Image: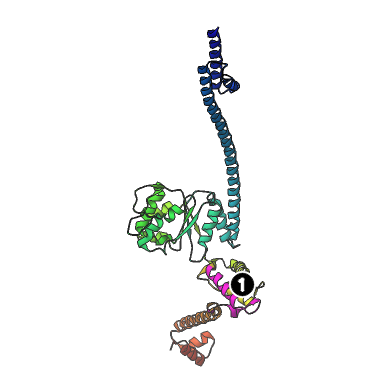
Amino acid sequence: MENHKLNTLLNRLIAITEELSQGRFGQYDDLFELTKSGQYPPQIARFAESFGMMADKIEAREFRLEQMIEELRRTESDLRSAREQLVRENSTLKKNLRRTFPFSSILGTSPQIRDLIAKAERIADSRLSVIITGETGTGKELFAKAIHFNSPRSAKPFVAVNCSAIPETIFESEMFGIEKGVATGVEARIGKIQQAQGGTLFLDEVGEMPLQLQAKLLRVLEERTLERVGSRTAIPVDLRIIAATNRDLGREISAGRFREDLYYRLNGVTLRIPPLRERKGDIELIARQFLDKWARSCGRPPLRFAREALERLRSYPWPGNVRELDNEIERAVALAYSDTITLADLSDPLQQQNALAAAGARSLLKDSEKQLIEQALHDSKGNKTLTAQRLGMSREGLRKKLKRLGME
C-alpha cells in the first residue's frame, strides 16, 4: 500500500514537472500541496518544495521574458512611428529648403537667363557634375545652391570652398582632412570633402586649385574614396561636385595650369552665366528687387528710382555684374535723403558715365572728320582749294579745321 501511494505521488510529481517543462503552470500550486507536513514522506515534501522554488523562479523569468517581448514590440512600434515621422519631417525639410533656394530666386526674364534656369532645373535631379562659368559677380554660387537644394541631396550639406582663398601649404589638409599627430599640436580634423558627405561640394574658382591637388581630387572622383593626410585608411565618399570659374579652362589646360582629365571628369554639364551687360533688359527688374530689399533692411518706407537714375543704371556696363549692382543700390539707399533715388545718390563711376560717353562720342566724331578730310585731300592730290570745294567749305575754314585736328 505504501509503495502504491509512493508511486502515485511520483507519477503526480512527474506529471507536474512535465507540465512545467512545457511552460504550463496550471498545476503549479499542486507542488505546494505535496509540501504539507505529515501528509507525505519528508523526502517528497523537500523535493516538492525545492522544485516549487525552482519553478517559481522559472515562472518569474518567463513572465519577465513576456514583459521584455512586449516592451520590444512597443519599441518596434515606436521606432516605426519615429521613422515615419522622420520621413515626414525630411520631406517637409526638403520642401522648406526648396522654398528657401528656389530657382525663382534667380532674377531675370531675358531669354538667356530663362534658358539657363530651365537647363539647371533639368539637371538638378541627376548625379552629373556641373561646371558653372561666368564673370565675377554673375551669381555662380546662387545657381549652385539652387541646383543642390532642388536635388535629392537637398537635406545633406552644401559645402562651399573658395579655391583661391586657401593657402597652398594647407590646401590638402583643408580639403582631405588630417590625422592627429601628423605634426606637433595637430588635432584630427575632417576635410571639406568629407564634410560634404551625401551632399554637394561647391568648388568656387576651381581654376585656382594647385596642380598637385587636382590630381588628388581626380583620384577621389574616380575611386569614390579619400585618405586623410597622415592616414592610409580609405574613407568612402558620396557627393556631387559643382565647380565654378571665371577663367577659360580650355586656355588653362593649354597653358598646363589645369588637368584635362579632371576637366572632363567635372564637366558633366556646363552652365555659362551671361554678364549683366549682355542682358540689360534684366537690370531694372534686379535693381528694383535690390531697392526693396535694402529699404526693408534699413527700415525705410518703399523707395523708387528717378527716371534719370534708372536710365543711368541701364546704360552702365557693370563690370562687377549683379554683385556690383547690389552694392550700388545698398549704397544709394543708405545715402538717399528722400524716397526717390536720384542721379546724385549714385556713385561717381555712374555719375561720370554720361561724361565718358560724351567724350567718347567727341573722339569718334574727331576721328571721322580726320578720315573724311584725309580722303578728300587724297582725291584732290593735296590741293586744299579743291579739297575745300569737295567738302563744301572755304579754304580758310579748311585751314582752321586742319589746325584743330592737328593735321597741318
Q: Position of residue 350 (x, y in %)?
A: 55, 77
Outermost residue, left side: 183
Query: What residue is shown with label 1?
Result: 298
The spot of residue 110 in percent (x, y) is 59, 62
Residue at the farthest bottom position? 396
Residue in the foreground of this view, choosing between 132 and 165 = 165
Pick the residue in front: 179 or 243: 179
Residues rendered magenta in the picture: 323-348
Disc 1 residue crowd, few under 14, some 14–19, many 20+, Cα 10 Å: few
**In the structure shown, which secondary structural element does the residue marked by tag 1 occupy?**
loop
The answer to whether one can see residue 259 in this image is no
- From the image, give the main secondary structure of the stretch colored magenta: helix
Which part of the image, by quadrant, shows the C terminus? bottom left
Image quadrant where one finds the N terminus: top right
76 with respect to 404 (left or right): right
Q: Verify whether residue 319 appears in magenta.
A: no
Any magenta on residue 339? yes
Position of 384 relative to 117 (above/below): below
The relative height of residue 345 versus residue 53 in the rendered view (above or below) is below
Coloring scheme of the render? rainbow
Residue extending farthest to the front is 38
The foreground one among 347 and 276 is 347
Is residue 309 visible from the viewing direction of this image?
A: yes
Q: Tell which of 315 and 55 is nearer to you.
A: 55
The three-letter amino acid code for the residue at tag 1 is Cys
- Please state the horizontal and vertical placement of residue 45, each as a whole percent of the image: 53, 19
Where does the image place residue 306, in percent across and percent down from the top left?
64, 76
Residue at (52%, 78%) from the top-left corner?
349
Report the number of discs: 1
Q: Residue at x 53, y 54 (%)?
A: 148
